[in-house]
Amino acid sequence: MAEEQNKTAVDFPGEIKEIPGGGIVLSKLDDVINWARSNSLWPLTFATSCCGIEYMAVAGAKYDFSRFGFEVARASPRQADVIIIAGTIVNKMGPVLKRLYDQMGDPKYVIAMGACAISGGPFFYNTYSVVKGADHIIPVDVYVAGCPPRPEALLHALISLQEKIKKGMTREQIKSGI
Amino acid sequence: MMNNEELKIKITGLLPSAIFDETGEWLNINIDPADWLAFAGQLRNDDSFYFDYLFCLTCVDFKTHLSMVYHLSSTKFRHNIVVKSKLDSNKPEIETISHIWKTAEFHEREVYEMFGVNFLNHPDLRLLILPDGWEGKNPMLKNFEDPVNMIKL
Amino acid sequence: MFRETEILKSGSQVLPTGEDLGGAGDLVINVGPQHPATHGVLHLVLTLNGETIKKVEPHLGYIHRSIEKMCESLTYRQFIYVTSRMDYLSAHINNHACALCVEKGMQIEVPERAQVIRVIMDELTRIASHELWWGAMAMDIGAFTPFFHAFREREKINEIMEETCGARLTMNYYVPGGLMADLHPDFQKKVKEFIVLFKRKIDEYDELVTGNIIFINRMKGVGMLSKEDAVSFGCSGPAARGSGASCDIRKLYPYAVYDKVQFEEILETGCDSLARYMVRIREMKQSIRIIEQLIDNIPEGDFQAKTKAVLKLPKGEFYTRVETARGELGVYIVSEGATTPYRIKFRSPGFSNLSALDKMARGSKLGDLVAMMGTLDLVIPDIDR
C-alpha cells in the first residue's frame, strides 16, 4: 500500500496518493505545522549550574543536538522556542525566570533538566533559598531525571518533546485547543 | 619566617592583652574588638610580620556570643596566624579593615548579611548574596527559623 | 529589584548606595543574570560613559543554595558530595579538600595507593577544567571552533572517569580515608593513550588560538592587575600567578603526593589577560607531566583506610587548603564533637577573584570586559555557594 511505502521513507505526517504523473500528499494542516515546529526548536541559553555543563556537552560534537534541529542556541528569549532549565532555581532567580518565560513568543515549551529543576534535588532539605522545583514558577512539559543527567538522557528528552508536539499533547497545544 | 614563639613575643610587645591558643595548626590570637584596627595596621605594615594576604574572614555563632575569625598569611615569609575576636550577641560591632586588605570588602558584606555584624566605617555595607528584603534576617545564626522553606530531614 | 536602564542627563546623580556618579551622559546598564558570556548567573551593573567603563558592580546570589547552612545538618560522610556541586568543574579537587579536612581532624592515615590515585584524578580534572575554560573563552571572544575541539578532549577524560567513578561530572569518588572503589582494570591503558593524544593536541591549540594575531590584540594589555593588588584582593590561582604572585598551594603547602612529583609553578609577569591565559595553557602541560610520572608507579595496597562507620570529629577547628583549577579553596570546620559539623566555611577562590574585576575593568572598553571575565575563569555557584 502507498501508506506503508510512505512510512519507511520519510517521517512526514500524511499519506501519498499515487496518480498518473506523480502523487498528491494529503494531510491535516495541524499535523504539518506540528511536524515543522518540532523539527526546528531553538533553545534559549539558560544554564544556572552544573547541568549547564552537560547541556554544553550535548551541544558539542560527540552528542550533537543540532542534528535534531536545535542548531542555533539563541541568547535572546524573543527568538527562542524552548527553554531548558538546566540548574537550580533559587528565590532570587525565580522572578528572572518568570520574566524570561513571559518574553518568549508563543508557542513555547519548557524542559526541566536535572534533579534541581524537577524538585529541588540535593538541596531539598534544610535550605532557605532554593525553589523546590521549577514548576512552581513556570509550567513544564518534559522532566529529565539525573544529577546531572547523561547527555543521552537529555537527547531522549528532546526527542520526547518532539514526539509530544507532533501528537499535540504539550501544555501550549492543549490550552489553545489544537 | 617567624615561628610561634617569636610571633608570641612580638605580639605581646605590641598588644599585651592578647591571649594565645596553640591547640590548632597555627597560632590563634584572641583580642578585644576595640584593639583590632590598630593591631591590623601593625600586622600589615610591620616589616618582620608583613601579613599581606588575608585568606579567610568569617564568623562563628556560639549561641552566647559571636566570634570573628581572620586567617592571615604572609607572601614574603610564609607564616600564618589566626586572629579571633569575641563579639556581643546583642550588638555585634567591629571596625572594618577593608582599607588594609581589599578582599575584606566582599567578605565583610557577606558576614554582615549572614550574621548581622555591623562593620563600622565600611564603604558600602549592604546585602551581597541574599535577595532584597532579607536585611535583619541573618540566616546563618543558630536561632534562625524558617518553617516554610527549611524542610527538616 | 532590577535597575532599569538609566541615562543620566545632567549634573550629578546619587545612587541608592550613596555613591555619586557625577558625570553627565553616564549610562547604567545590566549585564545578566541570563547572558551567554557570564558563564553562569552573574549580574553586573555597569556604569558606562559611552563605551568606557567607569564602574563595575557585581550582584551575586542568583544561585545561592545555602550550602553552608545545609552542611550543618549533614554528617561528615554526606557533606563531601554537596561540595562537588559548588565548583563543578573541579569536582574531584573540592571533594579532596573536604576529605583532607576530615582526615586531619580524625587523624586518619590515607594509604599510598589512594593518595597517588587521588592526585592522578585531580590532575585529569584540572586538565578538563582548563579545556572547558579555553573553549568557552574562545567562544566569548568570537571564535566558535575551539569550543568543539575542547569538548572533544573533555569527552575522552569523562569516559575515563566514568569507567572508574561511575559519573561524568559530579563524581562522588573520595571518602574520608581513601577512595570509594578501586580503579577499573583499563584505567592505566586509557590514561596512557590520552597522554599521547593530548600532547599532540596542546600544540594544535597553540597554533590555532594562541598565535592568532587577532586573539593576541584582544588580550594584550587588557585587564591589568598589579601584583600588590592581586595579593590585597586575595586573588589566587592563575589570576594571581599571571601577575607574578607565587601562590600555588601544591608547592607551598603540599598535600597528598605533590611533594614527591616534579613539576613547575608557572609564573608570568605580564599582569594582563594574555599572561593569565598563558599560565593556564602551561599549567595543562605541567599536569600532563605529573600524570606521566605517576601513572606507571601506582603502588599496590588498600584503596581505603579502615574507619569507623560513624565519624565524629573531636572538638576544635580544622583548616585545609587545596589548589583547584581556579585558585585556593579553603575548608574550615568548627566541630563541637557531634556527628555533624557545627560550622563549615568554604573559602572559595572565585569570591576573591571577582572582587578584583572592578579594579581591572575601570577605564577599559565594554568589549574588553568579556576578555577579562574569561581570563578570571569564574564559576558562579562557587562564588555564591
Image (cartoon, coloured by chain):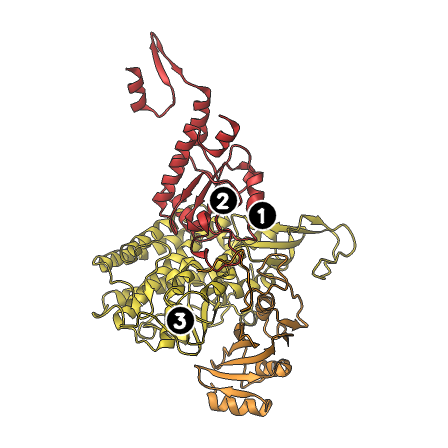
Chain colours: A red, B orange, C yellow
What label sits on residue C339 in the rendered view? 3
Q: Is residue B16 above or below residue A57?
A: below
Report, in whole angstroms, how far the alpha carbon at label 3 lies from the one at label 1. 38 Å
Subunit bearing disc 1: A
Give the amino acid at mark 3.
Answer: Thr
Give the amino acid at mark 1.
Answer: Pro
Q: Quadrant of residue A159?
A: top left
Give the amino acid at mark 2.
Answer: Asp
Nearer to me, C105 or C322: C105
Q: Is residue C54 above or below residue B71?
A: above
Residue B136 on image: x %, y %: 63, 64
Nearer to me, A14 or C265: A14
Report, in whole angstroms, how far the alpha carbon at label 1 lies from the one at label 2. 13 Å
Return the residue at label 1.
A95
Quadrant into which the C terminus of chain B falls = bottom left
Subunit bearing disc 3: C
Q: Quadrant of residue B65?
A: bottom right
Query: SS for tag 2?
Result: helix
Q: Is residue B133 above or below residue A73?
A: below
What label sits on residue A135 in the rendered view? 2
Nearer to me, C178 or C334: C334
